Image (spheres, rainbow, N blue to C red):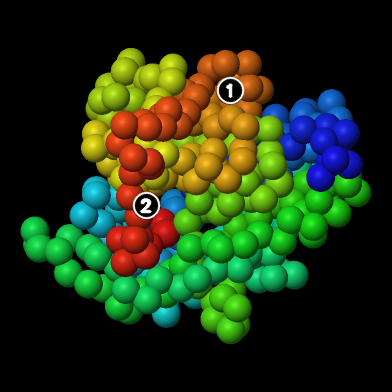
């Protein structure tokens, strides 16, 4: 670890799968950071491409919402195949080529490659269906339990940019879908990253999701348990990821606009929402209750 501290800081950038996010602008900024001598890991999702491919192949898609309001993609066998095809076969090659065209030595990887991302499958999850809380058992999704940090460090030390996406693999060899935001958080924690940046199709974290002028300079999240009650959908999941990254050792988490020019450099310069953990409350006798496994939601 001391050797790593003597090296340039690591920035983990998550390129959102929202169709409004500009991947070319993200790659241009990543290339600029690498040219400055920084170490960068690029994590990506691809919700827009997943939806497009699923529609083309006739694979129905549905969302699953947990009791705390966090919604995500329900993953059955056909959807898992679509997710893998969309991310590894379409989104990732485009990102890698864009980086290579800019002189970056990029390495595309899913969580399966080199057992990069080990995960625990969610055996049962609580979800809201028609206003009732039910248990869902047929979801092929998981939560990252470990990241192959030495593999990523070796790539970074060789001057490469790992380009990472779902799916992941369980210790017994089962392939599962995972959330890309939480994957980025796990990577940031494993690498002791200086910054985790979550780029999205919004100017940052908004107190009113319908009002972009309500973007927050700082957003405080609990040290464990549910995200703030006003957070919904994809932003709620981003705040869960931010919480996990900060608890895991990442020094800074930024949520920023991925639709504009220079999205990474502008966020690093301060044009972003910084997510911080609330201070512990000694009077409460410790930290709030952590989320139980059955309360987990599926990845997008």
Secondary-structure class at tag 1: helix
Residue identifier under label 1: 267
Q: Residues within 10 Å of mark 2 (few under 14, many from 20)?
A: few
Looking at the rendered image, the quarter that the C terminus falls into is: bottom left
On the picture, is 19 further left or further right than 24? left
Q: Are marks 1 and 2 in contact (CB under 8 Å)?
A: no
Whether residue 98 appears in this view of the structure is: no
Residue at 36 percent across and 31 percent down: it is 281
Q: Position of residue 250 (x, y in %)?
A: 62, 38
> Vertical placement of 269 versus 102: above or below?
above
The front one of 276 and 255 is 276
Residue 157: x percent and y percent?
88, 46
Front-most of residues 76 and 297: 297
Give the numbered dot on residue 10. Answer: none
Q: Residue at x 37, y 20 (%)?
A: 215
Give the residue number, with chain letter if any, for mark 2: 290
Estimate the x, y position of residue 29 in percent, counting from the top left.
Answer: 70, 30
Q: Earlier in the sequence, mark 1 or mark 2?
A: 1
- Relative vertical location of residue 95 with respect to residue 171 in this rendering, above or below: above
Alpha carbon separation for disc pair 1 and 2:
30 Å
Q: Quadrant location of the N terminus?
A: top right
Q: Is residue 249 left or right of residue 47?
A: right
């Amino acid at each position: 670890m001391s050797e790593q501290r003597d090296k340039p800081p690591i920035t983990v950038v998550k390129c959102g799968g929202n169709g409004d996010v500009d991947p070319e602008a993200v790659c241009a900024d990543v290339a600029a950071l690498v040219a400055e001598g920084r170490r960068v890991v690029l994590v990506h999702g691809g919700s827009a491409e997943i939806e497009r491919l699923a529609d083309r192949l006739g694979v129905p898609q549905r969302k699953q919402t947990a009791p705390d309001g966090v919604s995500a993609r329900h993953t059955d066998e056909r959807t898992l195949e679509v997710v893998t095809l969309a991310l590894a076969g379409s989104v990732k090659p485009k990102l890698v080529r864009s980086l290579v065209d800019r002189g970056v030595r990029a390495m595309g990887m899913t969580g399966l490659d080199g057992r990069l991302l080990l995960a625990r499958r969610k055996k049962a999850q609580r979800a809201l269906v028609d206003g009732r809380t039910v248990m869902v058992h047929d979801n092929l999704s998981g939560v990252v339990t470990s990241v192959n940090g030495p593999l990523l460090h070796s790539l970074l030390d060789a001057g490469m940019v790992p380009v990472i996406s779902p799916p992941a693999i369980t210790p017994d060899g089962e392939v599962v879908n995972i959330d890309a935001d939480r994957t980025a958080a796990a990577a940031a924690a494993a690498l002791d990253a200086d910054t985790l940046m979550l780029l999205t199709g919004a100017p940052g974290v908004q107190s009113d999701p319908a009002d972009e002028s309500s973007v927050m300079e700082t957003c405080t999240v609990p040290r464990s348990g549910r995200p703030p009650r006003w957070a919904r959908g994809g932003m709620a999941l981003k705040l869960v990821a931010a919480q996990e990254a900060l608890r895991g050792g990442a020094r800074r988490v930024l949520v920023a606009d991925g639709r504009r020019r220079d999205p990474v450099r502008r966020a690093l310069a301060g044009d972003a929402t910084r997510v911080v953990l609330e201070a512990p409350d000694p009077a409460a006798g410790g930290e709030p209750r952590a989320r139980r496994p059955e309360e987990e939601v599926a990845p997008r």
